Image: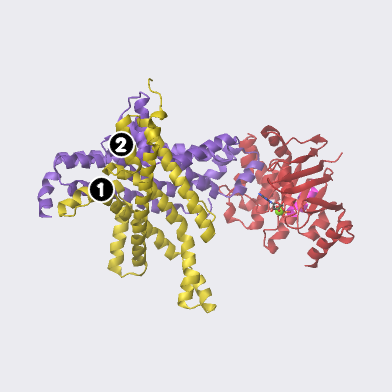
């Protein structure tokens, strides 16, 4: 313990603090970009799964298949598939793109489930009424169903996003400069593992805990005490 | 685009991969059981324990729910030896997974306990059930039914989570995929096959857990 | 020529037939009521007419022209002629009463907002809600919601109005305000097909009553026949039981 205290000033040097701050930003950025893209894609998938919107059954089945497949592939394995996929396609892309693509592919599958649950929580009589008024699926979605569903969709999506922030630690395996990778570098430079990994555990905690609190806050705020 | 997928070169390894899948299932099962026990103790403390103990358990659960499993295992595997706690890679992975799963299952089981309805117990009391009979015929069946779906989900999530063991050199499914990749360099083929293994594994687990839930507790909802 | 003719209409939800061989005709301006036990297929019949469920067999004709339920484009035409009011009102929960009434004419039909709004206010006044136009559905009583739903259906200027147990979800003291609204429409000469359990009202307002059971039309006749001298055992049985309370 005393040794750890001795090491502290050296560990929290100016350069290390900057290094960790950058890694923190990288983790946050990777999560944001990946989740953002993934949510948009997942939203599209959920909509394509709605019989009222997509009349052509094969497309609905493909959307379902995507969701069922991709939520069952571990993040690390998906990361490897994407990594080698880009490599073998001859696409020389930055590692950030590889990592963000993986996050997005995974987030799409899980977001699609959240969005679907939200859409289905809106009573089907709302769809019926829209249909008899000749609204058409997409219009009913935009004017009637989404305005009621988004407050059911957002909180679990936020909670899921926290899960993805944690999953981005696995992207350290392909050497992107996020938090976990930064800790490994510092560890290799000779700093003690307890300090390196302990510090980033705290940083992850700060990020995830705040996000979770925010999600909980939203859940209370958005709770449909009245249905609009 | 000179690359063509050649699954032929990796077919000899399918059995070897299946062995890895078996190890993955075992790791998931052990982590699940330990995590369940941890979760049960923690949920009981959260419900019935004294204030300091509750506070401690809250801290444990909150910490593990808000940090990545991979870093937790890194800490266990690399930092603990500095303090004289030597631990093998499989053990480190299982310990990390169990502690992590324990936090989730504490949350799940706490919510399950909280869902026991006063009214049901009162109804049982007016029917003249003894305390033990209440537990046996009212409380336990209710808890089982409420907890079964989220705990089943947890088991499937754990099955997928085992893949991080590969990072610590454990030769489970993903670890063996790394090994084959090093020998054959058919990277995309081997990792896509590994992905399919996980899909098949979890689909089977979902189906079995669904069937059990349906049979034992008449739960109709889908599992994972 | 009858305004609406159904001939040998059959439908199902994928398994057992829910409607079999249903036939009936409605003259222009006529009010026809459908009665029958719960589960006999009354709602399903109305759902088929508005194209929420495609018929398995049979034909529907409006003013002598067969209705095509085959394509989305044809369905849109169908829904310009039929408007339906549901038992549970099905108002859009995220819109005010006024917006519920104006949304389809403006968005779907692309009519000018000012004109539509004036019409909608007039319709809401007609159903007695001119003071509640800015209220959301959850701020309205069941009877008020149901009257908004009627106004919403009328805003599309349908040929034929279908009413599915529009008073069944209402507290007893709210029933009469909705029935009064329907009487008003009857006085305007609106052709209506009404599913109802309000037997006194059915008797008063309809020129023809259709008794359904198990997805079939069992007996059709003027109210005097159905209620006082039913020709079939099942209809007599049903009427006896429902009139007892
Ligand atoms: N969406 C549906 N899916 C499957 N079966 C349905 C559905 N709606 C109604 N049914 C069945 O169709 C039959 C007729 O129902 P319905 O038309 O609602 O009867 P009614 O309005 O006369 O009470 C019933 O047996 C009912 O169970
Ligand atoms: Mg009905």
Q: Residue at x 71, y 42 (%)?
A: C50
Label 2 crowd (10 A; few <14 / some 14-19 / many >=20) = some
The colour scheme applied to this rendered structure is by chain
Image coordinates of residue C34 in percent, x first then y, are 79, 52
Asked if the magenta segment contains residue B130, the reply would be no
Instruction: Give the residues drawn in magenta, as a range.
Output: C180-189
The residue at 83%/57% (across/down) is C203
The tint of chain A in the picture is purple
Marked residue nearer the N-terminal end (2 or 1): 1
Look at chain C in the picture and name its colour: red
Q: How many marks?
A: 2
Q: Is residue A71 visible?
A: no
Residue linked to disc 2: B179
Q: Nearer the viewer, residue A69 or C75?
A: A69
Task: Tell me, for residue B89, which label it has, or none.
Answer: 1
Q: Nearer the viewer, residue C194 or A76?
A: A76
């Amino acid at each position: 313990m005393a040794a750890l205290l001795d090491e502290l000033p050296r560990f929290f040097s100016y350069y290390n603090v900057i290094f960790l701050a950058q890694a923190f930003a990288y983790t946050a950025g990777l999560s944001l970009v990946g989740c953002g893209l993934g949510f948009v894609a997942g939203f599209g998938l959920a909509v394509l799964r709605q019989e009222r919107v997509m009349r052509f059954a094969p497309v609905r089945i493909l959307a379902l298949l995507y969701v069922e497949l991709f939520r069952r592939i571990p993040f690390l394995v998906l990361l490897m598939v994407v990594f080698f996929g880009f490599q073998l396609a001859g696409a020389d892309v930055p590692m950030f793109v590889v990592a963000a693509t993986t996050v997005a592919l995974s987030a799409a599958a899980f977001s699609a489930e959240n969005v679907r649950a939200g859409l289905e929580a809106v009573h089907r009589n709302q769809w019926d009424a829209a249909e008899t008024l000749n609204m058409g699926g997409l219009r009913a979605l935009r004017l009637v169903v989404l305005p009621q569903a988004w407050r059911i969709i957002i909180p679990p999506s936020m909670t899921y996003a926290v899960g993805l922030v944690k999953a981005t630690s696995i992207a350290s395996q392909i050497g992107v400069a996020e938090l976990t990778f930064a800790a490994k570098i510092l560890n290799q430079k000779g700093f003690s593992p307890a300090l390196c990994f302990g510090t980033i555990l705290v940083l992850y905690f700060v990020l995830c805990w705040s996000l979770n609190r925010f999600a909980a806050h939203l859940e209370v705020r958005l709770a449909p005490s009245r249905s609009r | 685009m000179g690359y063509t997928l050649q699954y032929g070169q990796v077919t000899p390894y399918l059995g070897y991969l299946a062995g890895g899948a078996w190890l993955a299932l075992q790791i998931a099962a052990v982590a699940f059981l330990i995590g369940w026990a941890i979760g049960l103790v923690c949920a009981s403390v959260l419900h019935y324990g004294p204030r300091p103990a509750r506070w401690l358990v809250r801290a444990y659960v909150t910490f593990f729910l808000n940090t990545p499993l991979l870093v937790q295992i890194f800490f266990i595997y690399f930092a603990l030896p500095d303090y004289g706690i030597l631990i093998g890679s499989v053990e480190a992975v299982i310990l990390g997974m169990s502690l992590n799963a324990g936090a989730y299952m504490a949350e799940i089981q706490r919510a399950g306990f909280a869902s026991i309805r006063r009214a049901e117990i009162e109804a049982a009391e007016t029917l003249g059930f003894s305390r033990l009979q209440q537990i046996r015929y009212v409380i336990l069946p209710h808890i089982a039914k409420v907890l079964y779906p989220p705990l089943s989900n947890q088991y499937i999530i754990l099955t997928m989570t085992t893949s991080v063991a590969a990072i610590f050199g454990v030769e489970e499914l993903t670890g063996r995929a790394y090994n084959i990749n090093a020998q054959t360099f058919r990277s995309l083929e081997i990792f896509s096959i590994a992905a399919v293994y996980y899909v098949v594994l979890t689909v089977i687990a979902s189906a079995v857990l669904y069937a059990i839930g349906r049979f034992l507790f008449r739960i109709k909802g889908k599992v994972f | 020529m009858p305004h609406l003719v159904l001939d040998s209409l059959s439908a199902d939800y994928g398994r057992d037939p829910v409607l079999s061989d249903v036939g009936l005709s409605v003259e222009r301006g006529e009010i026809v009521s459908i009665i029958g036990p719960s589960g006999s297929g009354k709602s399903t019949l109305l759902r088929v007419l508005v194209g929420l469920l495609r018929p398995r067999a049979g034909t529907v004709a409006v003013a002598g022209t067969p209705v095509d339920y085959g394509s989305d484009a044809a369905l849109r035409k169908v829904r310009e002629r039929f408007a339906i009011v549901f038992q549970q009102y099905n108002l859009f929960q995220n819109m005010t009463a006024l917006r519920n009434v104006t949304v389809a004419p403006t968005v779907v039909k692309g009519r000018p907002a000012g004109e539509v709004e004036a019409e909608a206010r007039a319709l809401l006044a007609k159903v007695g809600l001119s003071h509640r136009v800015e209220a959301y559905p959850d701020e309205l009583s069941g009877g008020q919601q149901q009257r908004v739903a009627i106004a919403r259906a009328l805003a599309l200027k349908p040929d034929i109005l279908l009413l599915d147990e529009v008073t069944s979800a209402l507290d007893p003291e709210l029933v009469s305000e909705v029935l009064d609204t329907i009487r008003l429409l009857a006085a305007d000469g609106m052709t209506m097909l009404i599913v109802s359990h309000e037997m006194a009202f059915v008797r008063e307002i309809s020129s023809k009553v259709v008794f359904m059971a198990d997805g079939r039309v069992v007996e059709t006749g003027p109210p005097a026949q159905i209620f006082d001298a039913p020709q079939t055992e099942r209809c007599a049985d049903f009427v006896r039981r429902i009139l007892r309370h």
